[in-house]
Image (spheres, helix red, strand yellow):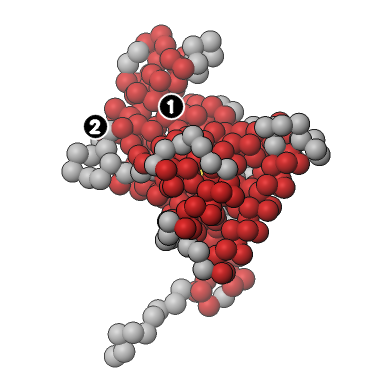
């Protein structure tokens, strides 16, 4: 028997069957999901929310405590505010997940994800538990067409799967190194502005993304932020052999620099934008270019 023969599922042999089994739902907000879909997602994530696991219990409880402390006027975990016991925290966590607006749901999940990083299992790498949780939630969100993706910088706008896997995730993992702390913060701020989905937010996103690239090059060349413009930093980084300098790469960098500088001039609020506020397409383009640029630099 040939052990190299691969058994193929029916869906691999029949593309139409695969479309029925795993339909493409496009990109949707959390609020667009039906109650049934939210219950399904809850059940797919239940292993992380069961309190039989002591680490999960601590993360769930603390995420509810933090949510109330951060947003005292709203007091989203109302049962816990009155009872302050584990049973109330579990009830509130599930109710928020299933019934609240997406901003509250994603804030709660962000707090829970942060606590996974804060409270890893002692015998594991500090990112291992977080990455497994992110992988699980992203697989579920992708299949349900939810328009966000969980990374080490928090939730970011979902891109094409190939862009996420081959560019965003590797770059964001590299930037999680403490060396790039200021870069990560600026990039995280850029994502925050993008998620506002407003013209000013998109323009702020462009401004902060440009600052992200400058900070990255400054740290790469000088070991700290503070000085150097985009073009001069690229030139110096290439002279020091810190980033690729072959003709092909020089052409790529020149084109990226040209596009980023033009978009910044036209839509950034660092100075009065010549074409008014940006739109989602402008902001997404500069985010993607920034990630490609940083990835290409890190490959050296």
Q: Nearer the viewer, residue 64 or 225?
A: 225
Residue 248 in sight from this viewpoint? yes
Image quarter of the N terminus: bottom left
Give residue 6's position: percent from left, percent from top: 39, 80
Residue 178's quadrant in the figure?
A: top left
Give residue 103's position: percent from left, percent from top: 57, 29
> Residue at horizontal 67%, vertical 32%?
270
Q: Nearer the viewer, residue 248 or 4?
A: 248
Give residue 86's position: percent from left, percent from top: 32, 20
Give residue 15's position: percent from left, percent from top: 59, 72
> Residue at horizontal 56%, vertical 69%?
247
Q: Residue furthest left?
A: 123
Which residue was labeled with disc 1?
A: 93
Left or right: 200 with respect to 222?
A: right
> Residue at horizontal 68%, vertical 53%?
258
Check contact, mark 1 vs mark 2: CB within 8 A.
Answer: no
Compare marks 1 and 2 and give the one earlier in the sequence.
2
| Mark 1 crowdedness (10 Å alpha carbons): few <14, some 14-19, many ≥20 | many
Q: Residue furthest bottom?
A: 1
Which residue was labeled with disc 2?
A: 54
């Amino acid at each position: 028997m040939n052990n190299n023969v691969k058994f193929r599922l029916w869906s691999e042999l029949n593309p139409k069957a695969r479309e029925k089994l795993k339909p493409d739902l496009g990109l949707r907000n959390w609020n667009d999901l039906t109650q049934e879909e939210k219950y399904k997602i809850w059940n797919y994530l239940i292993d992380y929310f069961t309190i039989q696991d002591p680490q999960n219990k601590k993360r769930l409880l603390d995420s509810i405590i933090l949510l109330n402390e951060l947003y005292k006027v709203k007091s989203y975990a109302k049962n816990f505010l009155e009872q302050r016991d584990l049973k109330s925290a579990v009830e509130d966590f599930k109710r928020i997940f299933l019934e609240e607006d997406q901003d509250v749901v994603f804030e709660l999940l962000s707090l829970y994800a942060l606590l996974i990083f804060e409270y890893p299992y002692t015998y594991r790498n500090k990112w291992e538990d977080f990455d497994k949780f992110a992988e699980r939630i992203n697989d579920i969100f992708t299949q349900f067409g939810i328009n966000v993706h969980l990374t080490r910088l928090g939730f970011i706008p979902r891109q094409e799967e190939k862009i996420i896997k081959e560019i965003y995730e590797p770059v964001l993992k590299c930037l999680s190194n403490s060396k790039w702390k200021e870069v990560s913060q600026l990039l995280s701020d850029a994502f925050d502005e993008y998620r506002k989905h407003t013209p000013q937010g998109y323009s702020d996103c462009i401004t902060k993304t440009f600052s992200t690239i400058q900070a990255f090059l400054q740290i790469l060349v000088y070991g700290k932020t503070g000085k150097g413009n985009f073009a001069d930093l690229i030139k110096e980084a290439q002279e020091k052999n810190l980033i690729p300098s072959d003709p092909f790469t020089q052409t790529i960098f020149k084109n990226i620099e040209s596009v980023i500088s033009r978009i910044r001039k036209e839509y950034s609020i660092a100075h009065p934008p010549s074409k008014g506020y940006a739109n989602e397409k402008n902001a997404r383009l500069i985010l993607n270019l920034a990630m490609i640029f940083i990835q290409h630099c890190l490959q050296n």
